[in-house]
Amino acid sequence: MKRLLFVFWAVATTALGQANDKEIAYEQVVMQRAQKIVAALQLPDSAQFKRVSHRVAKQYLDLNILHEGVKTAKKVLTDPSEEKTKQLEAETNVRLGQLHKNYLADLAKELTPAQVDQIKDGMTYGVLPKTYRGYQEMLPDLTETQKAQILTWLTEARELAMDADTSEKKHAWFGKYKGKINNYLSAQGIDMKKAGQDWEKRIKEAKNKS
């Protein structure tokens, strides 16, 4: 069976190779975005800063080509059966996995694991550290096992969110995993609704005191 996504990936790559004003503008946007993310690392070597920034920008461009190719494939799919749709989704996931793996391998050549995590957080709006901190503030009595599970799931969410093509979809991945975390904590005997209300009360009281 012919690989659907491969065909549209090739078409999209060729089309995007013929740069127009819109594409050039997008490249400038992602380069600025990449430089902002990498700037947070405060790399002392300007040459390294440029290399890493270009690699981050390239990942955004590669992801955009892939996602645009998928959109095109869905629009012109002559046989939009469940089988064809599943095939397209499977091929998309394989391609995303390849991009993701190659990207992290390239970053690892330039950066420490902690710095790579900073890049990941930069690409996902810092949702992981903010959410993890929020759970600990809301539930100060969490066990180390519970903290570890929460961090594991948020890390999984971040890996998936990195490859999403819109802000909404990135946040949706975290929303899905936060639901999973809340269900886990509820099963552990924690009243999440009450915990949330108590946390909001503590926040208001702290603001009133300041």
Image (cartoon, helix red, strand yellow):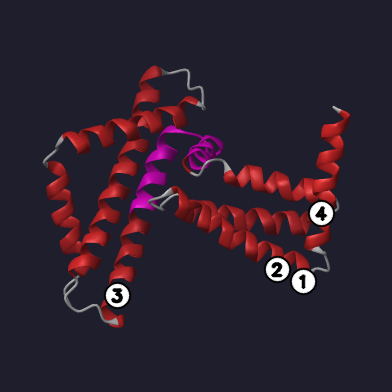
Q: Horizontal placement of 83 versus 137: left or right?
A: left
Question: Residue at label 2?
Answer: 183
Q: Secondary structure at mark 3?
A: helix
Question: Residue at label 3?
Answer: 85
Q: Quadrant of the N terminus?
A: bottom left
Q: Nearer the viewer, residue 187 or 54?
A: 187
Three-letter residue code for mark 3: Thr
**Which residue is at 85% across, 43% downward?**
202
Kindly report the distance in space between the C-alpha atoms of the residues bearing marks 4 and 2: 17 Å
Three-letter residue code for mark 1: Ala
Q: Are marks 1 and 2 in contact (CB under 8 Å)?
A: yes
Residue 143 makes an appearance in the image: no
User: If you read the primary sequence from the N terminus, does the residue marked by circle 3 or circle 2 appear first?
Assistant: 3
Question: Residue at label 1?
Answer: 187
Q: Nearer the viewer, residue 115 or 13?
A: 13
The picture places residue 208, in percent across and down from the top left corner, at 86, 32
Question: Residue at label 4?
Answer: 197
Three-letter residue code for mark 2: Asn
Q: Nearer the viewer, mark 4 or mark 1?
A: 4
Q: Secondary structure at mark 2?
A: helix
Q: Residues within 10 Å of mark 4 (few under 14, many from 20)?
A: few
Q: Quadrant of residue 54?
A: top left
User: If you read the primary sequence from the N terminus, does the residue marked by circle 4 or circle 1 appear first?
Assistant: 1
Q: How many marks?
A: 4
**Which residue is at 33% across, 31% downward?**
31
User: What residue range appears in magenta?
Assistant: 99-122
Q: Residues within 10 Å of mark 3 (few under 14, many from 20)?
A: some
Kindly report the distance in space between the C-alpha atoms of the residues bearing marks 1 and 3: 36 Å
Q: Quadrant of residue 137?
A: top right
Q: Secondary structure at mark 4?
A: helix
Three-letter residue code for mark 4: Gln
